[in-house]
């Protein structure tokens, strides 16, 4: 198994685990962590796409476009995480709960 295939499978695995955790837990902080795990999987897949093997020369070429997307995505993910945490803090201060009403089982 090549390194690129390993990175791709790890990225797909992280995305699947994040998706399952996103729908399985009602706790808002865990949902944010699941979204961060999903984004890490996407970034890993993009990094694996960026590296192209040239079999004849035994060297690897790097495509800069996916790497630029990963850097931009990291900035967006950090900003979105900070905003989501601020919203959770406000929601907790207003209601005293850390789950949404529709997620709570009665």
Image (cartoon, grey):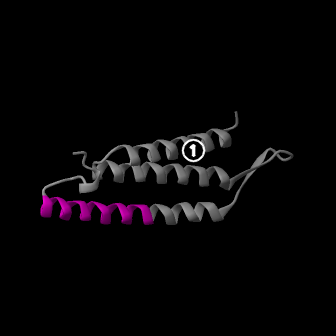
Left or right of 41 on screen, residue 64? right
Residue where numbered disc 1 is placed:
12
Tell me where residue 43 appears, x and y as whole percent. Answer: 54, 54
Tell me where residue 34 appears, x and y as whole percent. Answer: 39, 48
Q: Please provide the residue range marked out in magenta.
A: 76-95
Residue 55 drawn above or below residue 42: above
Image quadrant containing the C terminus: top left
Q: What residue is at 46 percent from the left and 47 percent from the top?
A: 19
Q: In terms of secondary structure, what is the magenta stretch mainly? A: helix
Image quadrant containing the N terminus: top right
Residue 18 drawn above or below residue 74: above
Q: What residue is at 51 percent from the left and 66 percent from the top?
A: 72
SS label for mark 1: helix
Left or right of 69 on screen, residue 74? left
Residue 28 drawn above or below residue 65: above
Using the image as rendered, state which of residue 104 and residue 98 is in the foreground. 104
Left or right of 96 on screen, residue 102? right
Q: Which residue is most to the front?
A: 106
Using the image as rendered, state which of residue 92 and residue 103 is in the foreground. 103
Left or right of 61 on screen, residue 9? left
Q: What residue is at 36 percent from the left and 49 percent from the top?
A: 33
**Quarter of image, res 2:** top right
Structural crowding at the residue carrying mark 1, measured as other residues with C-alpha within 10 Å and reported as few (<14), some (14–19) or many (≥20): some
Using the image as rendered, state which of residue 89 and residue 105 is in the foreground. 105
Residue 85, magenta (yes or no): yes
């Amino acid at each position: 198994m090549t390194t690129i295939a390993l990175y791709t499978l790890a990225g797909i695995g992280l995305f699947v685990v994040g998706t399952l955790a996103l729908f399985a837990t009602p706790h808002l902080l865990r949902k944010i962590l699941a979204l961060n795990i999903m984004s890490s999987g996407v970034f890993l897949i993009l990094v694996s796409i960026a590296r192209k093997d040239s079999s004849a020369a035994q060297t690897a070429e790097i495509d800069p476009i996916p790497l630029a997307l990963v850097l931009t995505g990291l900035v967006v993910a950090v900003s979105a995480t900070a905003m989501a945490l601020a919203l959770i803090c406000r929601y907790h201060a207003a209601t005293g709960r850390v789950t949404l009403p529709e997620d709570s089982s009665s």
